Image (cartoon, helix red, strand yellow):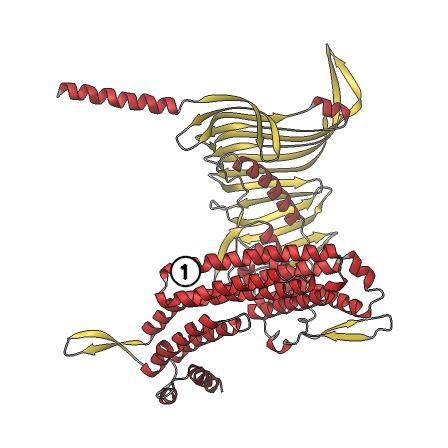
Amino acid sequence: MIYFKKRLVLLISLVFLYHSYGQEKQQYNGPLEVGAYKGKAAYTYVVTEQDTLYDGAFQLQSSNLNALLEEADTSFLMEGRFYKGTPTGPWHFQFGEFQTESESKLVGYEYRVLVSGQQEEGRGALSKGKPDGKWSYEVNRIKSSEVETTLFSSVINFKNGVPQQSFQMENDSTVLVGRFLRNGLAHDEWTSYASNDLEDTENWIFDEGLLQEINWTTDGISKKISVFASHNSYKTIALNQGYIDLLKATITSENSVDFKSDVAQLLAENDGYYAKLNGILNEMGPTELTPNFKVKVPFYELDAQQKSDIDQIAQDYKTAKSISDTLLHNSHLNIVRRSDADAQYRYEVVKKIDADFLQPLSTFAKYKEEDILEYMELPKLMQQLWPSGKPSTNIEVVTDSTQATKTFVLANTGEFNFNGNSTKTVAAIAEYAKLSLQELMESLSDRLTNEARLQALNGLEKDLIAENDTLVTQIDSLLPALPVLYNTPLNNLKKLADKSLGEYASLNNPEEKLAFGNKLKVCLDELQELTGVLGALPATSEEIKILYEDAIWNPFMATVMQEGVKKKVTSAYSEILIPSFLKQATEVDCENAKKLTEQITHTNDRMLKLREEDTKKLERKLRREKNPNEIMKLLHEQSTAKEN
């Protein structure tokens, strides 16, 4: 027993020594590249089983005397500490851009060259990658090796990454002071004033993060603007550029004024400097060096359909904008249109689509990227995007110097409805712009340079491959979880896409290739949408089945049992319509994929609504009906009758 204990102690000691040796700190001195910064580094690190981690003191710097003497030098210094790969403890950053002056000084046995330029300096402490304590950032203009002007400075106090107490920041024209609650929410009055005139002020009034009003005083004249009205739901978000854009949109739509703010400019400057430091440190270890100012905003929750609409709007805008830029900036087309009346007409249509459709949609797409659409009332946003009214499907343009006009309209214009203020409305506007520009591109393709056509094809083919890859991945991920009877319909969608790509590849004429490719891209989008609807169908049908069940007391079993209701309706749906949808998907092509998707979606919506409607008359009609098309007509008739 004693021998066994000795062996056990020896084994534990060896394991401990091995682990300690593996964690032993090592020193590095030499070149290092961190993001865009290349310089000479000195740091300690440890090698673990998984990775090499910075651990201990760290320094990276660069300066070039020869470059400075010849023309100019860009220098930097970064120094601090890491603990097991995470920035921890005090950190110091310097970034400089300097030029030498002709004057130099001899001090003792040293020549000292005077420099001018700009230097940025940031310093503060981090705790597990988060700012903790006082952080400062300063940008100075240097003249003859002395600070001439402070261009920007900020001082913020943090506790474990959350801004605390008061802060101050200023640039060469404005000073801003404000404070936070302990949770980082903006609170009370944030005041800014002009550096050269203390009477010119701008005050933001917060109440626990919610910006209630902004007051301006300029040249003795005061103005007050209310910002966010009371609402039943709020959400806490970061005070970043997205929030500033939300303010601009809200104030402009509520007060019909252009929002210009010295406070917003200062906050944006500060965010930019912190983003620079955060980007550098994240290259080396997990870091959250951000101002992390928090605010509250009204919240207008979007449902799944609205989110889907918004995604489609952004995609259609991107496609349309690419085509518009190609046509408007094509030098050959700009020459041809001067002597070609049809080219001039189509060029003017593109310009009008860009101005009336795409410029407002670019703002919508920007808000989507900033993730602030859920904090806006859509009708007010629509009014802001199209203050003179939404565009028309009939696009009228002036074609020549005589002010003669001509109207462009898509053949299927009747399918587009721009009425209302919903995401569906914006989606219709975006799709109409995209399809119109695709048609214009096809009609103008013979008047583009070969190089431009080649670039258009190259971009199109990249999109086609990406769309097809997305479709294949989508189907392959769905199939294992779906019933076997879904295999054939979904595999048919893959085969259809592959066959269509083959047809595209077989075309030799560039104009035909471009026209076919644009249509194929639309088709692939529609096949992805159909795939999503089919993939969700088993779960949707199960939800509908449960919806049509009532709890019934069974006296013989002495228990409550679930029993189906409106069985003629549910049988028609599950036994006739769903098999019909799957059969149609097995035979679908690019011409009817969108129609099938709409049929399935509409049917599912009707089934949800019919649960609460009087369906006795409908059930009598369904008793002998086996034709899927007739059944869908009956469901639609029930919907129409309900509306009437």
The residue depicted at 42 percent of the width and 65 percent of the height is 535
229 left or right of 6 in image: right
Q: Amino acid at mark 1?
A: Leu
Residue sticking out furthest to the right: 402
Image position of 317 with respect to 83: above or below: below
Q: Which residue is mark 1?
A: 478
In the image shown, does 214 or 312 lie closer to the viewer? 312
Q: Quadrant of residue 476?
A: bottom left
Instruction: Give the residue at x 49% y 73%.
Output: 596
- For the residue pair 117 and 558, the one nearer the viewer reads as 558
Is residue 121 visible to the viewer in this orientation of the structure?
yes
> Regarding mark 1 in the picture, which secondary structure is present there?
helix
Q: Is residue 386 visible?
A: no
The one of 470 and 501 positioned closer to us in this rendering: 501
Closer to us: 288 or 542: 542
Image x and y of residue 243, in percent: 58, 53
Among the 4 quarters of the image, the one containing residue 322: bottom right
Q: Is residue 567 left or right of residue 226?
A: left
Q: Is the residue marked by circle 1 packed among few (<14), some (14-19), or many (20+) residues within 10 Å?
A: some
> Picture coordinates of residue 234 (x, y %)?
49, 59
Where the N terminus falls, by quadrant? top left
Which residue is at the far left? 1
Q: Quadrant of residue 338?
A: bottom right
Q: Is 22 situated above or below 265?
A: above
Image point (64%, 76%), residue name? 413
> Along the horizontal axis of the image, is 322 left or right of 8?
right
Q: How many marks?
A: 1
Q: How far from the left and from the top, in percent, is residue 587?
A: 47, 72
Q: Position of residue 604 (x, y in %)?
A: 42, 74
Query: Does 229 sit left or right of 386 as displayed?
Result: left
